[in-house]
Structure formats: structure tokens, C-alpha cells
Image (cartoon, helix red, strand yellow):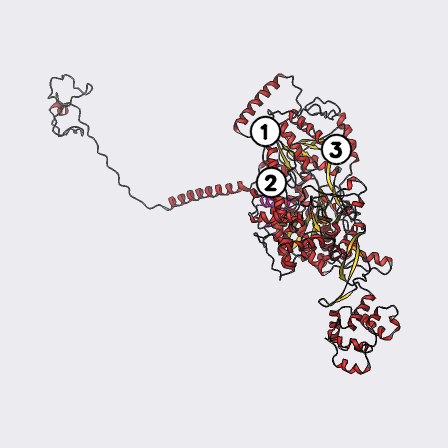
Amino acid sequence: MGKLRKKHNWKGRHQSDTQQPADETLPCNSLWILFPSAVDRLKGVDESNALVLPANKAKKKKAWVTPVSTKRPLTKKQRKELQTVLERKEKKVRRADILSKLAEVQVPESELKLLYTTSKLGTGDKLYQNKQENPCVVICGETGSGKTTQVPQFLYEAGYASGIIGITEPRRVAAVSMSHRVAKEMNLSTRVVSYQIRYEGNVTSDTKIKFMTDGVLLKEIQKDFLLQRYSVIVIDEAHERSVYTDILIGLLSRIVPLRNKKGMPMKLLVMSATLRVEDFTDNTKLFRIPPPVIKVDARQFPVTIHFNKRTPMEDYTGEVFHKICKIHRMLPPGGILVFLTGQAEVHSLCRRLRKAFPFRKSEDEEADTSEAMRKFKKAKQKKPSLPRIDLDNYSALPVDEGDEDREAGIGDEEDEGSDLEIGDDPNDAEEKADPSIPLYVLPLYSLLAPEQQAKVFRPPPPGTRLCVIATNVAETSLTIPGIKYVVDCGRVKKRFYDRVTGVSSFKVTWTSQASANQRAGRAGRTEPGHCYRLYSSAVFGDFSLFSEAEITRRPVEDLVLQMKDLNIDKVVNFPFPTSPSAEALVAAEQLLVSLGALKEPPRTGRVKDIEQARLSCPITPLGRAMASFPVAPRYAKILALGKQQDCLPYVIAVVAAMTVREIFEDLDRPAGSEDESSKLNQRRARLTQMRRLWAGQGASLLLGDLMVMLGAVGACEFAGCTPKFCEDNGLRYKAMVEIRRLRGQLTNAVNAVCPEVGAFVNPKMTPPTEHQVVCLRQIVLAGLGDHLARRVQGEEILDPKWKNGYKTPLMDEPVFIHPSSALFKTLPEFRAVWSEVPLGLDCVSAVEAEWVPQLLPQYCHFSSPQESPSPWFCSSTGTLRCHRASTFFRVAWQLPAVEMEYPDGLERYKLFSRFLLEGQVCPKLKKYVGRLLSNPSIMMKTWAKLQPRTEALLGALVSKRVDCRDTLYSVWKTEDKFLLSAYCQWLPEALHQEVAKSWPPI
């Protein structure tokens, strides 16, 4: 061991310089004795020896030293790694932004899958190939095939956007909505995909795809016949066969070849939703080379057709009600779409359904409804349930296989107790209020306010079923979401035109098979559906295949005037897809001739030439001015005469109101509750009071319903045309807004024709004066002369039903003034009717009998000039005047004798020569009256031709057609010696030199 061996208690004897750390929590002057723990005690040492120090070395507490960081520059490797990390993060941020923006325009997966499963992609290639080879193509595809939305996109992507791709729609709503939808699908702004309708549009210089109404394109053709701004024209909804669509197809069939000859090729597409394309393909007059037809499959879900076993002929609305009740009670959820014929039927059925299945809107009432629904379901579970049938498992059956439908057990004749078939016994459904199964009933027709129409596109309230009661406005161009059941009454209200009487009337008739199939297709747009037809399959078989074209059942004078303005004189030779009858064209030209829009055809010559001239009358300057106004020709004539006596603002307002029509709300509809009934009564009383106020008194009252319209328009404009004012006063807000827009359009048209007028729309327009009211009555009579009626005289009343009745020129039955008319109690002898359906005269104005021969000479048969008072020369006008009696039109109403211009003929020249000799035409010749060799009155004698002097004077006047002072003065300006020799024959030779010096005697 040696020296390295440690001795006993060496640790205790070892001196250490260690310092014990002081507790920071104790005072510095405190003395503390530290006792080691049991573990650290030394062996053999007890606690009594406090001086013994522990053998273990005291632990030092290390003070924490904050390290000083030193920044070192990054190496190249570290810098490269850091740069890579930053770039990766920036890419992630940019990718997230791109994905978020893409999600906004990305088509949902369901729609994308549906797009790939349809035939549109194949149709695009087929369309492109045919358009390259043919200038005109017909596309045939049922509703829902995507023609309207996809074809413009195909054309845009195929390179036809060098010019504008124009798409025409028959309705304004379709033009606006389709432009927005196509712009969204193509992810383009509205500056590129735009629309233009009658009163508004968003077309810009960047527009490449333009949706518009057919009337807008027709106006553009009047300004630019070759449509040089367009590269493709698409005529959509050609199956509806509207008048303007037919006119456009006929014009474009000639414009396309002309464009191709000039080296500016243009393409034409005609799109139809029915298979009736023979009117376009087989019409060699329209297309010399038949255009190819592309058929597009419909994107349609299967629809099952159900026929009634009997056809209700009278109360078909009651049958519709019972069918809806059964569908609502027995069939699975799904919207119901009902087709009726008119507004009155729609409101009546809505009232019955709301009463049978009331829908409550408040929260408390909704809770009650939920409780009632729970009880109803609980009670229903106790009843024996019928076997459940999934309607989606049934495929669509052809509509012409009614017998197979019934044999399969899904017709109304058999198995009436199943869930699928609901029978057609009206006694099964009771008209009893059942709030446990509320029905959300909404009307839909063209005159309904836009905000009310928009409700059908919104989802129904929770716990309810949607039921839309509509007219044929829902047949095409509209897709109501959630519709699974369609109830079709099979009827439609159409306007028919009587060519003999000139009266248009609405009649309820059976629809066509094509229209019935269109209605059935409404149930298969979003899911498989069912169509319940309230008529038998045998009745359906008797339907016409297609609806007849509109041009064959309406007056065509407005179309004839527009075509004459395009310098198409022989309208009968125009290539119509379906030509109107020759009688309709003759009637249209006769009306335009009577209005002064066309030149009167010659009445002498060969019969064949006269007949041809009746169908090729050229247009007059007045006719061109009338064609520039976007209203009917009768109203255009009123506008052309309106600038007299400062009446133009009133004429524009009245014409706008007459064109829009239906400016008052229909307050005669049935009420759905007592509350609604009392409100309707209050509104009827308010409207009656306002109509009396607007009609005025005295001279204003004789203006009749025209004054009521004028007052309503003026009051509405003065109040700012607000919805509240219209609702409070029984006015249709939609109609008043349209009148405001039409007033602006007519004002611009008038200023374009007559810039010196300076017309403007005055919202603070004051009522017309009495003199202006008289002028307005005369102006209206001049435009509506063929709509005149006369009160039945006492001696003509052969039947009591004729009392207080009126007789019209072309109708055998009497007509009566409507009780709502302002002239109902006045009963004037003559009144003008501007209603197109004058069987219920609610639009009348009083006229004076003596105005008729003066303002409507074309409708009167005049007698010879009366001898007492004898004809005279009017020094103020320089013409010959006389009194003549007349009869009106074909009914030979005797009219009072009135002062008017002397009629044309040889007698007119004789009379003028007499007044010339008497010095009345030229006052300077009066001094020679006493020196005349013969009495001037011999000019009127039958033997006057025996004297040479009479023949010389008369022959000179006839050769130059001088029968008035202005004509005579104009001839003297070019031939100052005219009539000198003939007049000198009436004077002694001594006066000849004196007369010659002062000739002409002006």
C-alpha cells in the first residue's frame, strides 16, 4: 500500500476551501447548520457531533451562461436547399388558388357524367361536318336534348366566331336566360355572350354569341338586308311556327345564297323540337336544295303515360281537381304540373286546392302541421298497407300504345287500387280540408308578375308538395325542377281569325299530339315521371298531329306592311314555310290601302290585271313611316296623325296602353278565403272609383275608356310607377312597366321619322284640354274606321235582345258595351272600338256621326253633290266645296250631309272654269266679268260643248289637270301664257291687248 494508503478519517481532516451556497430566500446574516441525510452520513459518526463535517464533497451549482449566437453565412449547398423548399411552398399556394378558381366554374361530376352519356358530343362532329358542306341545316331534337345551349358552343368552338353567331328565340325570357346559361357554361363574360330583346340588351362590340327575339332580327334586316355582321343565324323553336319565325326563315333562305355569291358566306340553322320538318325540307319554294336533317336524341327520363277510360266534356276542371287530390294522397313525393287553358281556370283551381290542402306559413302553425302529420302517419300505419310499387322501375311506354298500356295492368280500366293507378272516379276524392298533407299551390301564366312566376323555380317549403297550375306557357322553354307528375286536360285556348268579319276570338279546342307529347315530357326532365291524360286514347288518336302555323289563323296586315317596307311588293310570291291564304293577303292589302299605307290599285282594265294589282300595291311614304313604328298598322296610323294640336304625347301614351292591353288586374277571380274575398271587394271598389276619376266629365268622358287608360298611365308615371301604387289602384305593375318602355321606344321612333317634332316622355304630363280631347277622338276614329259600331235604332229592334245593343258592319249578332266601360251608361250613337274581340265592348270611345264621312271617306258611299246649298269656291283653300250625303260601308248606315271637296270628274273642271270666269279664282279678272260675251253659268249646261269658247277653256284645263287654284298657279310659273287665248275668246277683241299685258292675273 505504501504512501498511497489513506489513513483513518482522512476526509475529516482534509481542509477544503468550498463555500456553501446561500439560499436566496433567507437573510444573508443567518447561520445555518446543514445536516447530511441518512444516506450521506459517515459510518461511526452520530448526530451529537455537530462539528463533524460530511465526507462527501459539496456540489457546486453551475451558473447558466446564455450562449452567444453567431450568424454564419449560408453555404452554397444550404442556399440551394432553402431555395428549393421555398419554391415548393409557392407552388402549393398557387395550386390551391388555381383549384379554388377552377371549382367555381367546374361542372359537377354528376352533370359531367350526364354530358358524356348523351349524344351531344357526337352531334357536334356531325353538325360541324354538315355545316361545312351545306349552307342550311335542319336540327331536329326533342325538348331537353340541349340544342339551344350546346349548338352555339359547337359553332363558337368550330371557328364561326369571325362574325356574330345569332340565335333567335320566340320569347324574351328564353333569350335572356339562355344567354346567361351559355355564358356560364363557356366561362365567358356577358360582353361576349349577350342578348337583345325589345326594350333592353347588353350587346357590346366584343359580342360573338347573341341571343335575341325574332322581331329584333327582323328589324335588323330592314336596316341591313344582307346581315353583314353575322356569320351564322340559328332559328330556335321553329316548331312553334310563330309568324316572325316563318318570315325570318323565308328571308334567310334568300339572304344566304346572296351572301355566298358575294363571297361573304353565311350559314343558317333551323332547330325544331318536333319531327315535323317537311315544311322546311320538302318545300322547294323555300329551299331549292333540301337541307340535311340532323336528329338529336333527347336527354329525357322515362315517362309513363296514363289515359282516362272516359273523357270529360264539360267539367274537365273538376276532373283535374280530383286527379290532383288522388296523386297527392296516394302517390310518392314529387312535384305536380297541371295544364289548363286560361287565367280564370288557373285561379279557380288554385282556390279549390288551397282549400282542400291548406298550407300554413307561421311557425306555430307549422308545428301544428308537423304534429298533425305525425298523427296521420301513425294512423296510417295501423291501416292495412297495399304492396309498395317503385315507380322508377317502370319504363316509358309509347303514347300511341294505349291498348298495351291497359293490358299491362297499368291503365285506368284495371287495378284501380294500386299505388300506381289512382283511378278516375270523382267520388273517391272529397273536397275536404286536410291540413295534415299541405300542398304548395302556385299559378303560372304569361300575365303573371315576374316575381310570382319566379316562385315555381324555388324549392317548396319543407313538408309540402309543389303543385303548379299553368297554361301552355309551361309547355316549352321552361323546366320546372322537381316535377314528377303531369296532369294534362288536353285542351288549349287559341285565337282564331274570321276573315269575313275581321274579328279575332279565343276558343278552347283540343290540342295536338305533338303538344300533348311536349306536356308529357315535362315530367321526365329531372327524374322518371308519369303523365295523366284526362282523355281516352281514342280521343288522343283523333288529335291533329301538329298544331297549325300561327300565320294561318291570324291577320297578317302588319307582316304585309313590313314586307312592303322591304320592297317586297308581291307578297303572294314570298317563300313562306306555310303560306297564308290568298283571302288573308287580299284583306290585309285592302286594309293597308284604306289606311293610306299602300297605293290604291287601278279599278279599270282587264280582270286579270286588276286581280294581280290588288296583291302588289306599292307602299306610300305614309306607309314607310308607319312601318317604322313597332305597333299594329292601325295604331301606327294614329301615331302618324298625332302631331296635330300638340296631341303627340297623349297619342304615344294611348297607343302604348292599347298595344300592351290588360293594364288592369283581374279582380273578378274567385277568392280563396273570406279574408281574401273582403280584400278583393275593397280593391274592386277602389278600382271602380279610380276609373270614374280617370274618365273625367264632360268632353273627357266622351273619350271613354281611352281617357281611362290615359289617366291611369299619367297617374302611374306621376307616382313613379311603383309596385305599391299599382297594387293600390288595381293596375298590373308588369303592364305599366312595359307601357313605360314602349313609350320611350315610340318616342324615339317618332323623333327618327320627324326630327323637328322633338318629342320626349314627360313623367309629369298634364291632362289634355277639351280641344285636345276632341282631336284625340278624331285621330282614333281615323285609325280604327273599320271598328266602328252604331247603336241599334228603335225601329230596328225586332228582338228584345237587341235593346241597348250595337250593330257592327260585318257581324249579324248585336254587341253590347261592357259594364266596366266608362260609356256603359252614356250609350253614344256611334263609337269606335279598338278591342280586337269586340263581342264584349270594354274598350270604346264616342265619335260624332258627321266625322265619319270626313275622316273615313274610304268606307263611305257618297251621293252626288247637293244643289242646295249649291257648290262654291273656297277662297282660303283655293278648292271647290260642296255638300254630300253618304252611307257607311256595307251596312248602308245613313250619315248626315257634310261639307267636303267637290268630287273628281269633268263636272269639277266645268265648275272651276265657271268660277274662274266669275273672278273668284283670280280677283284681278273680276273687272272683266261685265264684259264677258256669255254668262259663265253656261259652262254647267249640257249643251255647253256646242260653243267653241266653252270647249277651248274646258279643254285647256283638262289637258293640264287644273281643277284648283294652286295647280293653276304652278302651271303659270312654267307657262305664263297658259289660258290666255282661251280666256280672250270670252272677251271682245278690244280688250285682248290689255289682258295680254297683265297676264297671268296673279
Q: Quadrant of residue 857?
A: bottom right
Can residue 281 be seen in this snapshot?
yes
Q: What amino acid type is highlighted by mark number 2?
A: Arg
**What is the CA distance from the residue labelled 2 to the residue labelled 3?**
50 Å
Q: Is residue 258 above or below residue 303?
A: below
| Dot 3: element | loop
Q: Which residue is mark 1?
A: 359
Magenta-colored stretch includes residue 175: yes
Please indicate whether residue 876 sits to the left or right of residue 63 in the image: right
Q: Which residue is mark 3?
A: 399
Give the image location of residue 942, x and y in percent: 87, 68
State which mark lies toward you, 2 or 1.
2
Q: Amino acid at mark 1?
A: Phe
Q: Quadrant of the C terminus?
A: bottom right
As for residue 564 lying within the magenta part, the answer is no
Q: Which secondary structure lies at badge 2?
A: helix
Q: Nearer the viewer, residue 269 or 196?
A: 196
605 or 706, nearer to the observer: 706
The residue carrying pointer 1 sits among few (fewer than 14), some (14 to 19) or many (20 or more) residues within 10 Å by Cα, namely many
The label number, if any, that marks residue 686 in the structure image: 2
Task: Check contact, mark 2 vs mark 1: CB within 8 A.
Answer: no
Q: Earlier in the sequence, mark 3 or mark 1?
A: 1
Nearer to us in this view, 206 or 212: 212
Relative depth, front residue between 342 and 615? 342
Up-down: is 88 above or below 587? above
- SS at badge 1: loop
The mark that comes first in sequence, 2 or 3, is 3
**Does residue 803 appear to the left or right of 180 in the view shown?**
right
